[in-house]
Image (spheres, rainbow, N blue to C red):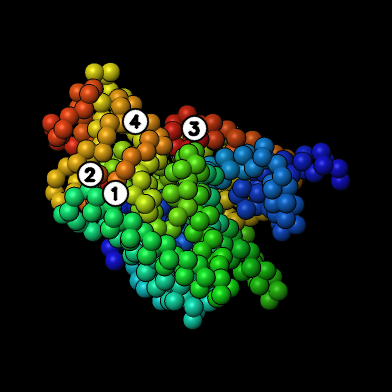
């Protein structure tokens, strides 16, 4: 039987095809988005093997639960990146918990400045512009939380700021970024 | 906590939640609130898009990893032993509608097509029964649900119904440069609906005309007007190998006067 070639399908149609157990459709999802899923997981975990596990979990979950993706709420790329981020953060936190249990020192995030400079190189221009348009007190907690995998409470400790302040700065920073990105057409 | 207090508490957490920077209790609190609060839901969705933009990159896919994932697919699908069976049945069901080239006149085409539809409907019923008896009917309903979701951007009821049928076909109409200009869903009975259209509006003296390629000849399916409207319906039948769109004078023509502005293959 001839099926429509997966490479010609839109992302939303690909997910429908995955729902019909079409492996070529899942392979196409992997081809389109696997690199981004891996890239984010690798940056958050700092570990290639853990990042590969994350990619595998994210893709297998799409295979078994394609209905979890709701195209009316955002793009497939965003959905997969959110999954990748959540799993990468879980990996970082369980690693930290394991190290604490074993009585080992949990390494504090060092070189935060270096890290975010590296990030600037790989971010799309508009995204880099959006994050650098934020005042430092909003930019730092967002980057520590998102790329460092820290909870806002941990960020509060790292930055010696009250938890409530960190919480609200993350929110106001994201709101500003949303405005900048919407204006530049990256996301709305 | 009162509802308002919960709302305020959750609202203050939305940014951190979108960055996965809350603890498990907070996550549970936010998620149960989101189910009933469209305003918070919308804010989180927007923040998730921002987070995705931050996390987006153009890294290459890791080599070799796909082989590992592909090797695990059957294990993670619903029930190892029954998976292949479901898949085979789904294929069989869809194959019942596979378009075939026919050289005969329209009446013969219609008659064959009706017979095929009946055979396929029977096959569909058998498949449905088999799925229920395997207690795996959710595998089927998830397909319906997905199709409804894919169409959630506002298609009409008839187009939705066509999408909800697992045997529908989708035709992507693309311009010469590869840009996707329209999507057509074709129901198992051969009725097509325009799902989405990005054709540039034409002056009133011109119209878009839709054609089916049957036996290498373009057969007019009708005029789409100068601004093709979503949900426009037309009869595609089952013999078309491709759909084409041309720009014609307002009254339409009997054969295309120029090269198509969009083409899409019709496949099962």
What residue lies at 28% left-to-right and 58% top-to-bottom?
Answer: B112
Residue A39 or residue B161, whichever sits in front: B161
Mark 3 in CB contact with mark 2 (< 8 angstroms): no
The extreme bottom residue here reads B81
What residue lies at 58% left-to-right and 43% top-to-bottom?
Answer: B45
Question: What residue is disc 1 on?
Answer: B237
Mark 1 in CB contact with mark 2 (< 8 angstroms): yes
The extreme top residue here reads B204
Q: CA distance from mark 3 to mark 2?
A: 40 Å
| Chain at tag 3 | A
| Count of numbered marks | 4
Nearer the observer: mark 4 or 3; the answer is 4
Nearer the observer: mark 3 or 2; the answer is 2
What crowding class fits label 1: few (fewer than 14 Cα within 10 Å), some (14-19), or many (20 or more)?
Answer: many
What residue lies at 64% left-to-right and 35% top-to-bottom?
Answer: A172
3 and 2 marks on the same chain: no
Q: CA distance from mark 4 to mark 3?
A: 28 Å
Q: CA distance from mark 4 to mark 1?
A: 20 Å
Q: Residue B210 appears in which quarter of the rendering?
A: top left
Question: What residue is disc 3 on?
Answer: A182
Where is residue A146? Give x, y as percent: 57, 50
Where is residue B138? Give x, y as percent: 56, 65
Residue A49 or residue A111, whichever sits in front: A49
Question: What residue is disc 4 on?
Answer: B228
Q: CA distance from mark 2 to mark 4?
A: 17 Å
4 and 1 marks on the same chain: yes
Nearer the observer: mark 3 or 1; the answer is 1
Whether residue A30 is visible here, answered yes or no, is no
Query: Vertically, is A52 above or below B18?
Result: below
| Chain at tag 2 | B
Question: What residue is disc 2 on?
Answer: B212
């Amino acid at each position: 039987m001839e099926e429509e070639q997966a490479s010609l399908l839109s992302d939303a149609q690909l997910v429908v095809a995955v729902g019909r157990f079409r492996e070529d459709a899942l392979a196409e999802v992997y081809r389109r988005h696997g690199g981004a899923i891996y890239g984010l997981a690798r940056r958050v975990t700092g570990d290639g093997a853990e990042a590969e596990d994350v990619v595998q979990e994210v893709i297998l979950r799409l295979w078994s639960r394609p209905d979890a993706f709701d195209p009316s709420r955002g793009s497939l790329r965003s959905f997969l990146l959110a999954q990748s981020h959540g799993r990468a953060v879980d990996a970082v936190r369980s690693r930290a918990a394991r190290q604490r249990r074993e009585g080992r020192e949990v390494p504090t995030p060092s070189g935060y400045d270096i890290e975010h400079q590296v990030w600037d190189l790989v971010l799309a221009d508009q995204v880099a512009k959006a994050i650098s348009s934020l005042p430092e007190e909003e930019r730092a907690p967002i980057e520590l939380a998102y790329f460092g995998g820290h909870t806002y409470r941990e960020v509060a400790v790292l930055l010696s700021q009250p938890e409530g302040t960190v919480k609200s700065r993350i929110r106001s920073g994201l709101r500003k970024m949303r405005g900048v990105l919407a204006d530049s057409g990256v996301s709305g | 906590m009162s509802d308002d207090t919960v709302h305020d508490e959750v609202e203050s957490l939305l940014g951190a939640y979108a960055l996965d920077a809350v603890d498990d209790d907070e996550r549970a609190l936010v998620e149960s609130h989101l189910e009933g609060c469209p305003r918070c839901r919308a804010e989180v969705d927007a923040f998730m898009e921002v987070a995705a933009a931050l996390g987006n990159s153009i890294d290459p896919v890791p080599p070799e990893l796909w082989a590992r994932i592909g090797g695990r697919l059957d294990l993670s699908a619903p029930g190892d032993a029954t998976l292949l069976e479901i898949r085979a049945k789904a294929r069989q069901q869809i194959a019942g509608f596979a378009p075939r080239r026919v050289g005969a006149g329209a009446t013969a085409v219609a008659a064959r097509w009706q017979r095929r539809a009946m055979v396929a409907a029977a096959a569909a019923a058998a498949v449905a029964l088999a799925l229920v008896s395997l207690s795996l009917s959710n595998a089927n309903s998830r397909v319906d649900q997905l199709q409804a979701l894919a169409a959630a951007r506002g298609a009409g009821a008839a187009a939705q119904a066509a999408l909800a049928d697992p045997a529908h076909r989708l035709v992507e109409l693309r311009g010469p440069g590869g840009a996707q200009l329209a999507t057509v869903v074709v129901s198992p009975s051969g009725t097509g609906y325009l799902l989405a259209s990005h054709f540039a509006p034409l002056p009133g003296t011109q119209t878009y005309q839709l054609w089916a390629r049957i036996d290498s000849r373009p057969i007019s399916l009708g005029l789409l007007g100068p601004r093709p409207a979503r949900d426009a319906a037309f009869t595609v039948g089952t013999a078309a190998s491709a759909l084409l769109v041309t720009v014609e004078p307002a009254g339409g023509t009997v054969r295309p006067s120029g090269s198509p502005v969009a083409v899409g293959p019709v496949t099962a």
